[in-house]
Amino acid sequence: MNQKTLVKSDTSTKSKGGKTKAEFKRLKKWEGELNKCIRCGYCYELCPIFKSFNWESDTPRGKLLLLYGIITGEVKPSNDIAEKIFRCFYCENCTDNCSAGVPITEILTDARKDFVDAGFYADGTTAEIEEDLCSACGMCVSVCKEEALSFVEDENGNKKVALDKVKCKGCGLCIATCPSGAISQKQGFGVTPSELESQITRFLKVNDTKIIVFSCNWSTFSGLQLSESPTLINTPYGVIVTMCVGRVTPELVIHALKEGAWGVMVSGCPPEECEHDGNYKARRKILLLKNLLKQFNIEPKRIRMGWFSRGESARLKQAITGFVDDIERLGPIRDLSVISYW
Amino acid sequence: MKINVEKLKKIVGENNVSDNVVDLYVYSSDASVHQAMPSVVVKPRTIEDVQKIMGYANNDKIPVVPRGAGSGTSGHSVPIDGGIVMDMKGMNRIIEIRPEDMLCKVEPGVVDDDLNRTLKPYGLFYPPAPASSRIATIGGEIGANASGVRSVKYGATRDYVLGMKVVLANGDLVNLGSNTRVHSSGYQLERLIVGSEGTLGIVVEATMKISPLPKFRCLAVANFKELEDAGNAISDIIASGCQPSLLELMDGIGIVAVNKALDLGLKEVGAIILFEADGNVKEAVDYEIRKIEEICEKHNGTDIEMSYDAKERQRLFGGRKKLFASLSKYKEGIICTDLADDMGVPNSKIAETAKKIHEIAKKHNVIMAVYGHCGSGVIHTKIMLDSKKQSQWDEAARVIEELYDYVHSVGGVTSAEHGIGLSKAPAWKKARKDIIPMMRAIKKALDPNNILNPHKIMDAPDDWVKATNLRYRVIS
């Protein structure tokens, strides 16, 4: 038997800017840390990207292996690899679960910078601005806590909004905020507004679900996954991960009610703990919605908001159980026609 | 080797096949030191998919390597001959749970912890529990005959397999074993598949025995100044007829590593023993714990701490659970490699083996931690070395040879729960020359074209260092 030689990548290695020789200087300083990865796989247990695709190349350990391959010259950098690297919501579940202590997301951020510098391009989980639709109102700039969005001037001196793809962590608040629908994520990983809507519909149709729970990926969802069976057991509620809870719009809640949900629970990080300040934004929207529902004779208590820290999944589960009891006492919404035109 | 990717796409769908180098590269390694590229990766969704893929591969004589979580430590899922890597993670349905028959039926991609989360509301559990249970798949556990921290009382995967559906090399589907707790109806072929590392067939459904969750679990920890004392205490606990549900050893190197990685603040002594008793009667659990405690004290065990509380037990066990990964933190510039990682020795040889491991490591200028499920004779080690230096790899090879010669001389086994794969094959072959012809005959009868995970176990290369590329960059 011959010793196998690793095949080097020749596909899509030419970057968009025409540069073919990337230096990847930032990445090289991480060689020692990359070497420490023992491929145990604990990093992908709670990775939302891996759960969306189920490919090894979407696991944090797979990405680290690719980056190690770039450093050692085993693989050539390519747009395909860049795409994998830009797929990350920075929930940090991987880093938190790596007991070899590899700072995974820090490495990914440096890799992103190197890929951008070398002229490679990827959609990843980052936002995308459609310039024709953008009125440069700046609402997105004000909500982005990562400072990934900023005003710049185009060649004619006109103000426009620019996105820094390295800084964008894909929380999606800008998408939920943009009044002209100019911002989107090309690949939504199940968390764009339309994908969330279809998830809600599927939950309510397929299972005997009465309640929809929107859960923030950064705070409690990881713990919740570890306390529940992924299959077989039908619960009266369905948990939908929204990334930042600031993504939960009144339209989404109304959609759930229209599709047959008896109640909706929105769970986000406690005040001061949200990395994106999405919790405050969600609270404002949900309060307004509750007031509106009152006008239409729909009990506002059908919508509940709760704050739960990382590691408080047991408390969240308890809160869900209490909410389910309350909603079951209320029964279905008596007259849905009042919101049917919303 | 020419592989018809389009044909594979027709079988499993466009999105479940990849020959993109990005995917091939990440499927080239597992948790072992080995690395070799496949030609294509496929993700079957159904038994029929697996049958069709095997039919095609057998016809065209293409190697097929089944893969679960890719957490194997000996290179079982590294495609040494290229070909198809079959990622089984997508077949992850828990088909049924039958509490009345105390069994469950699962697809091979079901993750161990997911199965246990599902069984918990029924008051049941699936006991083998390898340390990697949070990602390890049932199919992979069957392939390696995995076991774990509770093997001292509950045994290994082989003790839980009642039956299985297996796709053979030619694509035929066979039903092995039964739905009954025991059977005496012909060859125990389901047991033949256990530990076969994907070389005899592809498990597509498994019927597993399940157990009632005990009402009480009490975990305790004891410190020992000397590693030898801890080893002798373990041998004594087992020989005295105690029935711990967990009996683990962790040496001083391990303690320092988890303190560095996880900031646990454990007392840095020669070794610690973790022991647990479980049962439905608290007094009985108390009795076991007291008995083990007495034996520990007899062997100079101190600072004994215990708890029935689940959170507290998790805290006490936290360091051991993450030890493997933490070892890379032991010293700057060294990394933890999965070599000589899971030998098994007779109960009376625990202390002697632990001492011997440290002696051999010192002699060859490498660092080796000693830990493991020593209550069932499983001794884990890891060789910690500077992976950039060729000289360190050469030393590692000498360490392995010397260590396995010793283990075999005291009646131990090369691998207790991780399997042989590539890296342990030379030592295993040296010790088990007698059974190699029989194993080759079985392999030939079931896989005449040698396409199922070829060149593993008895057919693996004689030099593990040169068997494949190492997944580390060696500079000098």
Image (cartoon, rainbow, N blue to C red):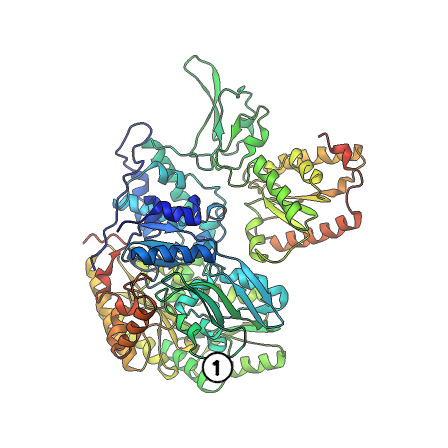
> Tag 1, which chain?
B
Q: Residue at x 72, y 52 (%)?
A: A322
In the visual, does A40 lie left or right of A22?
right
Q: Is residue A252 above or below residue B353?
A: above
Would you identify the image quadrant in which residue B462 lies? Answer: bottom left
Would you identify the image quadrant in which residue B259 lies? Answer: bottom left
Q: Is residue A39 visible?
A: no
Disc 1 residue type (three-letter): Ser
Disc 1: CA contacts within 10 A as few (<14), some (14-19) or many (>=20): few
Q: Residue at x 65, y 50 (%)?
A: A207
Camera-side residue of B430 and A159: B430
Q: Is residue A170 visible?
A: yes
Image position, residue B228 (x, y; %): 36, 79
In the visual, does B332 lie left or right of A316?
left
Q: Is residue A216 above or below residue B46?
A: above
Q: Is residue A82 above or below residue B359?
A: above
Image position, residue B463 (x, y; %): 21, 65
Image position, residue A159 (x, y; %): 48, 17
Q: Which residue is mark 1?
A: B184
Q: Considering the image in quadrants, where does the N terminus of chain A appear?
A: bottom left
Helix, strand or loop at label 1? It is loop
Q: Residue at x 58, y 80 (%)?
A: B286
Camera-side residue of B200 and B145: B200
Q: Residue furthest top?
A: A156
Image position, residue B39 (x, y; %): 31, 50
Q: Is residue B403 above or below residue B326?
A: below
Q: Considering the image in quadrants, where does the C terminus of chain A appear?
A: top right
